[in-house]
Image: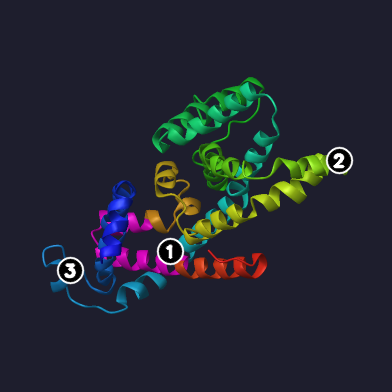
Amino acid sequence: MAQIARQFRRYSIMYVLLLPGLLYFAVFKYVPMMYITAGFKNYNVLKGLWESPWVGWQNFKFFFEGVYFYQIIGNTILISLYKLVFSFPAPIILALMLNSVTSGGFKRTIQTLTYLPHFLSWVIIYGLMVAFLAPGTGLVNQLLTAFHLERISFLTEPSLIRSLIVGTDIWQSVGWGAIIYLAALTGIDPSLYEAATVDGASRWRQIWSITLPGIRNVIILMLILRLSAILDVGFDQIYIMMNPLNQEKADVIETWVYRVGMQEGRIGLATAVGLFKSVIGFVLVLGANRLAKRFDGQIW
């Protein structure tokens, strides 16, 4: 105990800085876990968690046997895969491009322009989409009309909603996500590039043989974190962009849980679905971590 007390006094400032993060996880991550049992009950707000009747797996069965189960799961998985395939590599590509820029002013300008969308809410982003893509007054459709082309209902067409979701997600997050990879790139020894240049390696060969291996660990870590939230496709974004006309292709687990849990008051069912998502994410994290250990010789 005496040694622990000395360590605490020595690093007291560090512990104070760590305290807000610990409180955040304690209040918003660990305390809510006591309400997991609501997924196995017919939760009643008036009766509370402990007095609500126990229904076992009934909430899970209702969700799995529901008429919209395959549509909701299918939409969630497809949008998640699209974001994983297109959104995940985008910050890496942007970081590699910025790392190759020699002009400091131009590099800072591009960084600023790509960071800015991260600070815009999805309400503002959707307002910009309306300004550009609205069927009647949108700039794009006005240009189409000027060239005697048919107008396109971008915001209500079911076949386009997933592309809009993924495209706006890339635009909003690519600059902010590139910060991590730019920081990792600074840790690569410049002498490796000098030696590769002397050996006659091209720019592409240097990226493939030096840059990517140098940030491989960061890429693997970010991939594991991304897989842990594979079923979290962004409630704010989809809820704002979804409407009755494109709901067939945009309705996901999170929006369904909101309608059932918050609008219909079926808290037990919403909790059960949330627990189902958490279990899937936990399994994917373990699987991705094991693959990372097998192919990289490390485990996080």
Q: Which residue is mark 2?
A: 198
Q: CA distance from mark 3 to mark 1?
A: 28 Å
Under mark 3, the amino acid is Leu
- Alpha-carbon neighbours of circle 2 within 10 Å: few (<14), some, or many (≥20)? few
Tell me where residue 100 sits by quadrant. Answer: top right
Q: Quadrant of the N terminus?
A: bottom left
Q: Kindly identify the residue that appears in the image at 50 percent across and 59 percent down.
A: 230
Residue 258 within the magenta-colored segment of the rendering: yes
Q: Residues within 10 Å of mark 1 (few under 14, many from 20)?
A: some
Mark sitting on residue 49? 3
**Residue lying at 32% horizontally and 78% vertically, measured from the top left:** 57
Q: Is residue 134 visible?
A: no
Which portion, as a residue range, is magenta?
256-281
Mark toward the start of the polypeptide (3 vs 1): 3
The residue mark sitting in front, 3 or 1, is 3
On the image, the x and y values in percent for residue 136 come to: 50, 27
Taking depth in this image into account, of 30 and 54 the one nearest to the observer is: 30
Residue type for callout 2 = Val
User: In terms of secondary structure, what is the magenta stretch mainly?
Assistant: helix
Indicate whether residue 37 is drawn in magenta: no
Horizontal and vertical percent for residue 269? 30, 67
- Residue type highlighted by circle 1: Tyr
Query: Residue 171, how many percent across, how many down?
Result: 55, 37
Residue labelled with disc 1? 68
